[in-house]
Image: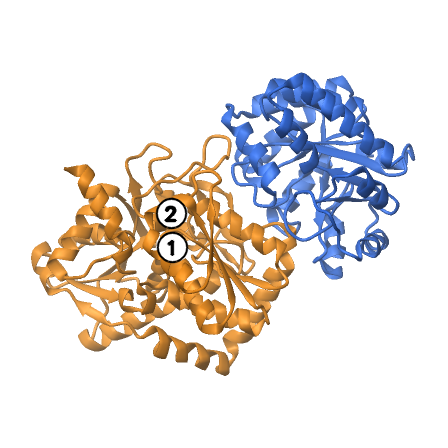
Amino acid sequence: MGKNLPGYFGEFGGRYSPEILTEALEELESTYQKLKKSKKFKKELEYYLKNYVGRPSPLTYAERLTKLWGGARIWLKREDLNHTGAHKINNAIGQALIARFMGKKRIIAETGAGQHGLATATVGAMFGMETVVYMGAVDVERQNLNAKKIEMLGAKILPVTAGEATLKEATSEAMRDWALNVSTTHYIVGSAIGPHPFPTIVRDFQDFIGSEARAEFKKRNKKLPNAIVACVGGGSNSIGMFHAFLKDKQVAIYGAEAGGLGPKPGEHSATLTYGKTGFLHGTKTLIIQDEFGQIVPAHSVSAGLDYPGVGPEHAHLSQTGRVEYRMVTDEQALDSFLEVTRVEGIIPALETAHAFHVARDVAKDLGKKKDLIICLSGRGDKDVTEVLRLLGERK
Amino acid sequence: MSKIKSLFESGSFKSAFIPYFTLGDPNYHDSIEFGKTILDNGADILELGIPFSDPVADGPVIQRAAARSLKNRFSFDEIFRVTKAIHDHKPETPLVYLTYFNPIYHCGITKFLDRAKESGIVGLVIPDLPFDTEESETLFRELKVRDMDLIHLVTPASEKKRIQALSKTSSGFIYYVTSFGVTGERREFSVDLKERIKFLKDTIRLPICAGFGISTPEQANQISQYADGIIIGSAIQRVIEENGSDKTKTVTALADYISKIRASIS
C-alpha cells in the first residue's frame, strides 16, 4: 500500500480527507479516467481552450530583458494572455466539464489572489452553473478587483474570517462546503494540492503550458531550452510548466517560492525550503508546521503564494533533486515586478514576479547563447493597488 | 479484550453516551474540571479532543474551540498531563482521543501511543485518516499491540464494499456520521438513519455509535432506540463556549446537560 498506489509521488500525495468525501473522490477519479480516454471529451476541452481561452498562448522572446540581464536568451510563456488573465482558466474549464459530465450543477472553489476564483466564476457563468467562491477576508481586501469581478460574473463570494483569513482557511472552508453538499456539488480545486485525484487532474489540465512551450520552442529553435523557471505556491502553473520537461535531463528546472519577509516562522511561505512532511487538506506533503504538528500561518506579498503547503508532486521533485527550488523575498519580487513592467511592457502578477527574480540569476549563470523560458503565469492588473500601497510604504 | 469491547459487552446500558470536548478551551486547568464533571454525570466513554489548527471535518463551534485552545501554549506534555488527571478521577471510564493525523505523525506514532496509553487513553478517532492508507495500517498494528482501539468513521455516503473492507482494521466501535457535512447541531437527520444503522450492524461486528448533529435529549432518546451509542460534541462545546470564562457556571451547566442526555437514553 501507499507509495506504489496511484496518487502518490514518491512518498507524497495520497488521500487523507474526511470519510464523507471518499465516495465523491472515487467517483471523480473513475470519471476522470474514463474521460481522459474519451475523444469527445478531449475534443470538447480543446475546443474551449482554443476558442474561449485563446490557446495556445504565445512564447514571447523578451529581447530587452535578455539585453538587460546580459545572460541567457529569455522567453516568456504567456499565460497572462489567456482569457481572465492567468493559467487558472485551463484547469477551471477542464474541471467544469468533468462536473457537467457527472451531473453536478453547483461548483465551488477556494481562491487566494482571486485568479482561480475568477476563472471558476467565469466558467460558472459560461456553463450556467451555480458558483460559490471561498476567499479569505484579508484576500478579499488586498485583491478587491478580482473579488468584485467574481461577484459581477454572478458567483457568490463567501469571505472566510477564521485564522489568518487567507488561502489556507478558504481551502478548509471549501472542503467543509463540499462535505455538506457532495451529491450536488463539484469542488474545483485550484492548485495541484488536495486529496487524490486532484493533484493529478490539475497537473494534467495545466500540462498544456509546458507541452506547448516545449513544442513551440523546439520548432523555432530546433533544440530544447537550457532551463525553465516558474513560481510555486500550491504549484499549479509550475507543475504544468515542468511536467513536459521532466524527462529532458538536459533542461534545468527551477521553482521560485515565497521567502516573504524572512526566515522566521510566520514570515514566509517557503514550504520546500522550510517545510516538513505532514498531512494537510487531504494530502501528504511538505508543510510549514511547528514542533507539535500545528500548521504555522504563511506569509507572502502575493496572495496566490500565501499557503503553508505545496502540491505533493513538487515535494517529490524537491526530494529527488530534479527541480531546484529557490526562495524570493517580498522585496525582491516587488523589484522584479517593476523591472519587468518597465523593461518589457508587461505587468506580471506578483506571483510570477518571484519567478523573474530567480530567472535573472539563472540567466546570468547560464551565460549567453543559452535559452531560458519563464512561465508568466498571470498578469498583474489585480496587484496594482497593492503594489502602489507597498511602494508608498517604501518612500 | 479491549476496554471498550468489554464495556459494550457488559450490558450495563442500553445505549452508550459518548460526550466530546476539546482540551485546553478556555485553558488546560479548567479542562480537568470539565472532564471530571462530565464523567460524574454519566459519560460511558469520554472523547477528548486534541486541538489542531486546521480541523476540516469540524463545524464552527469546534473550530472556534480549537482556536481558543491553541491560544494557550500547546504541548503534548500538557495534553497527557490533563488526560491523566481526568483518567485518575474515574479510571473505569474509557477515554479516547479525537484528533487529526498531523500532530500524531509529528509526535511519532509509537511515542504518541505509549504516552497516550500511560495517560489512560484506550482508543483513537482520526477524521482525516482513511482506513486504506499505509499510515492507518501502521497505526492499527501499533494500537493492537497496546490493546487500544482504532475507531473509524462511516458516513451516509460509504458504500458496502468499503464498509466491509474497513471492518478489517477497525475496532472498539464504529463512529457513524449521521448526516453529510461537518460536526455541529442539526434539527433533522437523514430519513433512512435507522435502516442505515441496522445495515451497519449486520455488516460490521462492532457497536455502531451515532454522532454529528445530535444535541437535544429528544434526539438522543430517539436515536438510542436503534444505535449502540450517542456521540455529542458541538452541543457540549457550546456550553463551554457560552460559560467558559466562568468555571463554576460552566461546571453547573455541563452537569445539567450531561445528566439530561444520560437520562434520555437510559
Quote the CA–CA distance across marks 1 and 2: 9 Å
Name the residue at 65% across, 46% down.
B137
**Chain for colour orange:** A
Q: Which colour represents chain B?
A: blue
Q: Element type at marker 2?
A: helix
- The label shown at residue A252 is none
Return the x and y of residue B243 as percentages of the image width and height: 64, 25
Residue A229: quadrant of the picture: bottom left
Residue density around tag 1, few if under 14, some if 14–19, many if 20 or more, within 10 Å: many
Residue density around tag 2, few if under 14, some if 14–19, many if 20 or more, within 10 Å: many
- The label shown at residue A139 is 2
Name the residue at 79% across, 21% down.
B40
The answer to whether residue B65 is above or below residue A41 is above
| Closest to the observer, B51 or B33 | B33
Residue B172: quadrant of the picture: top right
**Amino acid on which disc 1 is placed:** Ala
Q: Is residue B100 visible in this depiction of the protein?
A: no
Q: Same chain, marks 1 and 2?
A: yes
Quarter the N terminus of chain B occupies: top right
Callout 1–callout 2 Cβ contact below 8 Å: yes
